[in-house]
Image (cartoon, coloured by chain):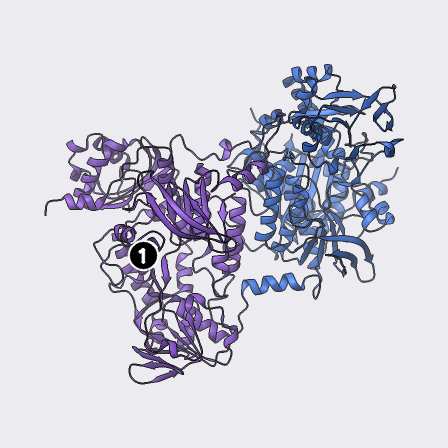
Chain colours: A purple, B blue
Amino acid sequence: MTAIVDHGAWLARFQSALAQPEATDWRSLFAEECYWRDLVAFTWNIVTLEGPDAVADMARRQGPLVSATAFRLDPAMPGGDEGWFDFETTAARCKGHVELKDGLCVTLLTAMVELKGFEEPAGRNRIDGLVHKAVRKRRTWLDDREDQARTLGHERQPYCLIVGGGQNGLALAARMKRLGVPTLVIDAHERPGDAWRKRYKTLYLHDPIWLDHFPYLPFPDHWPLYTSKDKMGDWLEAYAKVMELDVWSSTVCKQARFDEARGEWEVEVERDGRTLTLRPAQLVLATGLSGGKYVPDVPGAETFKDRSYHSGDHPGGEDMTGRRCVVIGSNNSAHDICVDLWENDAASVTMIQRSPTIVVRAETMRNLSGDIPYARKEIPTEAADLLDAVTPFRLKTGIQIAGTSYIRGLDAEFYDKLGRSGFQLSYGEDESGFFMAYWRRAAGYYIDVGGSDLIIEGEIAVRSGEIEAIEPDGVRMADGELLPADLIVYATGYRPMSEWAAKLISPEVEARVGPCWGLGSGTRGDPGPWEGELRNMWKPTRQPNLWFQGGNLAQSRFHSLHLALQIKARMEGLPTPVYWPDEARASVPA
Amino acid sequence: MTAIVDHGAWLARFQSALAQPEATDWRSLFAEECYWRDLVAFTWNIVTLEGPDAVADMARRQGPLVSATAFRLDPAMPGGDEGWFDFETTAARCKGHVELKDGLCVTLLTAMVELKGFEEPAGRNRIDGLVHKAVRKRRTWLDDREDQARTLGHERQPYCLIVGGGQNGLALAARMKRLGVPTLVIDAHERPGDAWRKRYKTLYLHDPIWLDHFPYLPFPDHWPLYTSKDKMGDWLEAYAKVMELDVWSSTVCKQARFDEARGEWEVEVERDGRTLTLRPAQLVLATGLSGGKYVPDVPGAETFKDRSYHSGDHPGGEDMTGRRCVVIGSNNSAHDICVDLWENDAASVTMIQRSPTIVVRAETMRNLSGDIPYARKEIPTEAADLLDAVTPFRLKTGIQIAGTSYIRGLDAEFYDKLGRSGFQLSYGEDESGFFMAYWRRAAGYYIDVGGSDLIIEGEIAVRSGEIEAIEPDGVRMADGELLPADLIVYATGYRPMSEWAAKLISPEVEARVGPCWGLGSGTRGDPGPWEGELRNMWKPTRQPNLWFQGGNLAQSRFHSLHLALQIKARMEGLPTPVYWPDEARASVPA
């Protein structure tokens, strides 16, 4: 039973209000609890406004600057009768979604789709690639491609430099290429895909394939549901080639400095042992969600007589047959490495759990994901991305609390057994579970692909508590017990992502930019204030011309579009008036 | 104004007739002029039956063997109200199309789509790729892939060996892979795509991109309309990798012999200088539409004092600046090379035309192709392939005569100018133009991408007539004139495709198989009798377990499915009763 909701009438009133935002009573359009999520369209930022005052402030400041018009319902979207619409600003064609309750907006999504006058040539508008006419000294595709590769970074500077050639760097570079933004990707590894290939051998994607498509070139329909790291590596390499991306492999970013006067970066890179200076206008860090490897300072660590390393250096457990292994940590890497060691017949595998961990079974996630829009062949991935973007993070928290409770019910027996094994379970501080933990700090969980059963069966021993010291023969726990070990793996996580800014640029820039990732939920590892969006991701930072591109494959695909549009607009000199919600908050009288 | 046509009623009567073919008056179902085109579904062959007697003969012989049932209209096909239907045989799910006139069938298409019980795992039925469970001595994707690559051709024999790793070999190999047929591709070049990369540098695909998609992995939507040879080379290499094809590069097939007793081939190959024997059950030649380079025996050729070579060895015209060039031949290669030499500022370029040539402007083809089903985004390529397959070759001839006349009208001024330049134009013996020439002998035409304008403008000189001899300084024509030359290019074509069978197997096998390609139209280069399908292509030959895979990219994509289904059925030991139309013809009393 659905009430008849007139989205068209609301849109018409919304459009009028935008034309005279000062004269509008925004409470006549938005409910007292309301959310406006904007992806670049109005704010040239990624922002969720909460409540009618925040909405009014943004509309009043940005409305006159972006001139949104031509609102019209889009019945062609999946769920098109549920408030999907198109509109335009001075700069762009955009898409939106509105949810109404008693005639008032409770959620609004506005998202930029393409810049007017800078549409990507495709389909009927694709380039010919060839003139059907004889031309003296013809240049072929190969001539141009080789020229481009030879001169970029030397005779011609890239407008945009992307540090990191993993899935995030390449997806963004592909968008840039289609938008005609001269872009260079640098990557420390020998060839594209190596960041995946070099991880431990049993690594697979945790997300089903329908979440993982890249822009422009979706995976074929027979691709396995879960992709091995090496297959992903091959895909990335083929993708870079087929999309004609300019990637410098074996190239390390040593130091970057923003030249305010010239409005460009001075980036020192080392390529095949040679030092070069690049001068891009825009610098994108696509170096992953974490900074350097984090190993806690444990007394006596240097006295351990056998092998020890960080989880990121785990080569695979083949050499550990018959050996006693201790893994410090209880998140994904810790579990995967414990399983790998067990599979390779280690004599014993002990996991040291230092704090409770969120566990969710991959099989359960897979079953629940079978009907999401991404999994439905009739819904294009671009539409599924928008469908997924409708819900603001504040509401996602509530949904995830309910979802976590539902999953606890589904897998009650599993959680019961795992709890009784001595493993300390968490469901998140506010019981919002795995997904919120991912968005809040990208850590603190295990997606169970078999490790929990081994713990339940006692094949992996779990030991909780504090570590007193490392001794030559093993790990001494605070309660006095010695865990004898031939191998110690520190699955103790990584330093924060923002560290890259300090390392590659300066501690001052890291401080100016502030934390990356996280929502500001005020829970462990995600200090407030509440942001309501992922901090500094795919949007302007407080360091001019510095950007962060990251996330899982789905985020990389979707938000690389938003980042690419922002950079393209700047290259073309379009006005890009950024709305900073923290300034709006600061300007509200106390 | 369309009469209401009841395809459903006809289908019901057709299904009943198939159940008792001897008792059926086939003239009550088929018109006196009628065509039944079968792609493997009924005949395990690729056959067009012409006339009710031929239809009846096939239906009587094959009907009981294939047991076609479950005929039902398919309104989901584009043009679904125009007679598209699904049906099943004992072995397979199939698709068909019927065109009725006054209640009688005038054209019928039946095409196998997939084998029952051997459906390709894809979409919801794709493999998981990963077990969410700990397993001792786990094998990863990479372990399996490397094992496969290491053992195939050594410890394990491929069921199918494909000679030639160009677009045809790779497209078929991809189908085989998806069907689980152990298949090895061998190719003489160093890496996949080199067969394209090594051609002359100005080579581009003549077909617009929407005709050129590969199975499973379509080109992205921004791909240029016309693809350069080098970009195609990169695509093939990426395709082989991403589709996980087993390709041995730098491998030459020396000799193949069919061991009748064991029902397998003994194939001697040289890989990186080492000789190996492979024992596949099935041997596919995917070595292109032509045999070796053909250079006519011209008196004095050995006395020429400067460079001369076959068009296939043309390295590009960069070194020919300021030199006098003579190109013998007037088809595609001859024109492309003449243009290339002109573009590189050759002192003079002369084309020697030995017989009239069909010319069609690429721009005209492109304009006319803009509305074909392939160009329409809403029609999947698989459906467009079927739409294209509806018309039998006999009717295509008539359509092409009309089309050629239409194009002559469109481009009257162009043809007029070209004719007055001294170039001898042909429109085909029966004025059926370019496409029929392609199907009949894959030669005799030029797709004009600029060469004709150069001829019209006198930039390329055309000289018709017989060559008397080659002399040290040039080409002596039969009328006594000497064409002075610093370069002679023999753009004189290739020997027939069937030559590969003689060269790799034996002259006896070539003779048994007979000509490949061509329809048996009785026109020049395509001797009769009329076959109505391309001879020996993608279907059983008279040499057991020998197959030919070839054609342009569209044919490669579409018919690789039919060939793959035939080979898969044999591997699985399914009955594959082949209907040989020549035997049927022979058995008709004179």
Q: Chain of mark 1?
A: A
Q: How many marks?
A: 1
Quarter of the rendering occupied by the C terminus of chain B: top right
Could one spot residue B31 in this view of the protein? no
Q: Residue at x 87, y 47 (%)?
A: B507
Q: Is residue A459 left or right of residue A36?
A: right
Q: From the image, tell me which residue sits under label 1.
A: A439
Callout 1: 10 Å neighbours few (<14), some, many (20+)? some
Q: Quadrant of residue A279?
A: top left
Establish if B20 lies above or below A421. Answer: above
Q: Is residue A315 left or right of residue B318?
A: left
Establish if B25 lies above or below B1. Answer: below
- Residue B458 appears at what percent x and percent y? 70, 17
Q: Is residue B159 left or right of residue B526?
A: left
In this rendered view, identify the residue nearer to me: B494 or B526: B494
Quarter of the rendering occupied by the N terminus of chain B: top right
Establish if A324 lies above or below A77. Answer: below
Secondary structure of the residue carrying tag 1 is helix
- Residue A298 appears at what percent x and percent y? 32, 75
In this rendered view, identify the residue nearer to me: B558 or A204: A204
